[in-house]
Amino acid sequence: MHILLFCLMLSLVNLVFSNEDYSQTSACCTFKGPGLKDIEYILIDRFNKKVMKEFNSTRGNWTGFTNYSIEVAKDWNSDPYDALRRAFEKKLLCTDRKDYIQDLGNFTAAPTVKLNSLKHPPVLVCSAYNFHPKQIQLTWLRNGQEVTSAVSFSEAMSDGDWYYQIHSYLEHHPTAGEKITCMVEHFSLSKPALHVWDPSLPAAERIKIVVGLCGLMIGFVIVGSGFIYYKRKSDAYVTQYQGRVSIPVEQLPRADST
C-alpha cells in the first residue's frame, strides 16, 4: 500500500482590502501511489482565514461553503475556461514538479550518533543528528535487554535544511558489569546501529589531560636542565678558583720596582 509522500503548499494570491479584511488563495499538490502517479491538486480560497470555496482535481469541481460562495462555485463549475485554467495550474505546479518531488522522496541521510552523560541528575543522552527522512527509532538496551522505564525522548526536530535531530534520555545509576547500548533504527541503515556507552572519560577530556601532562613534563625538563646547567657552572668556578695561588696584598711588588 502506497501512502501520501509529499504535500507542496503554495500561496498564490494575498489581497488586502482594508486593515481588517483580506483574501488568500493557496494551492496544495499531493503526490501518492506507485511512482507518484496519483496527483491531486487542491485550490482553496479564504476570506479572513475562513474557507469560502475549494477546487479539488479528483472531484473535478468547486465546492462552496457559504451561501455566496456556493453560487459562485456553481457559476465556475459551468465555465469550461475555468476547468482549462485549473488543468493548466495542476500541470504547472504539480505534474511538472513530479521528478523533483520524487528525487526528494528518495533522498536519505544516515544519522550521526553521539552518547553523552549528565551528572546532575545522572542521565545518559543518546543524540542522533543530520538524518533524513524524519522517521527514526532510538532504543536503550541494558545487557542486551530493552529498557522501558526511566526513558524519555524529544521530538524529531528539523534543522531547517532537510535534516533532523532527536535526543533520548535514560536515567542511569552505574552498576558493575552492566553494558548500556543505544540502538538506532533508520530507513538509511541496512540494520540497527548499536552504540555502546563507554564510561571512561570522553575523548575531549582525555586530550585535555594528555596535553596537561605533556606541559607538566616539559616544565620539569626545563627546570631540570636549568638546575644541571647551574650546577655545572658552579662546579667549574670552584675548580678554577681552587687552582689559583693566593698572595697577600702586602707581598705584591710595587709598581716602580723592577
Image: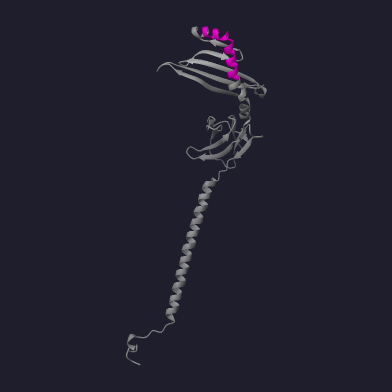
- Against 187, residue 48 (above or below) is above
Question: Residue 101 vs residue 46: left or right?
Answer: right
- Whether residue 143 can be seen here: no
Q: Residue at x 55, y 17 (%)?
A: 43
Task: Estimate the x, y position of residue 121 in percent, counting from the top left.
Answer: 48, 37
Is 225 in the magenta? no
Seen in the picture, residue 75 relative to 34 is either above or below; the reply is above
Q: Say left or right for 228 vs 195.
A: left
> Does residue 242 appear anywhere in the picture?
yes
**Image colouring:** one colour
User: Quadrant of residue 88 in the image?
Assistant: top right
State the residue in front, 190 or 79.
79
Residue at image position (51%, 51%) is 209
Q: Main secondary structure of the magenta part?
A: helix
Figure quadrant of the N terminus: top right
Q: Is residue 189 left or right of residue 117?
A: right
Place of residue 9 in the rendered image (x, y in percent of width and height, measured from the top left): 54, 22
- Which region of the structure is painted magenta? 71-90
Image quarter hosting the C terminus: bottom left
Q: Is residue 70 left or right of residue 253?
A: right
Residue drawn at point x = 47 percent, y = 69 percent: 229
Q: Quadrant of residue 241?
A: bottom left
Can you name the residue that lies furthest to the front here?
A: 81
Is residue 78 magenta-colored? yes
Q: Position of residue 168 (x, y in %)?
A: 54, 33
Is 229 located above or below residue 22 in the figure?
below
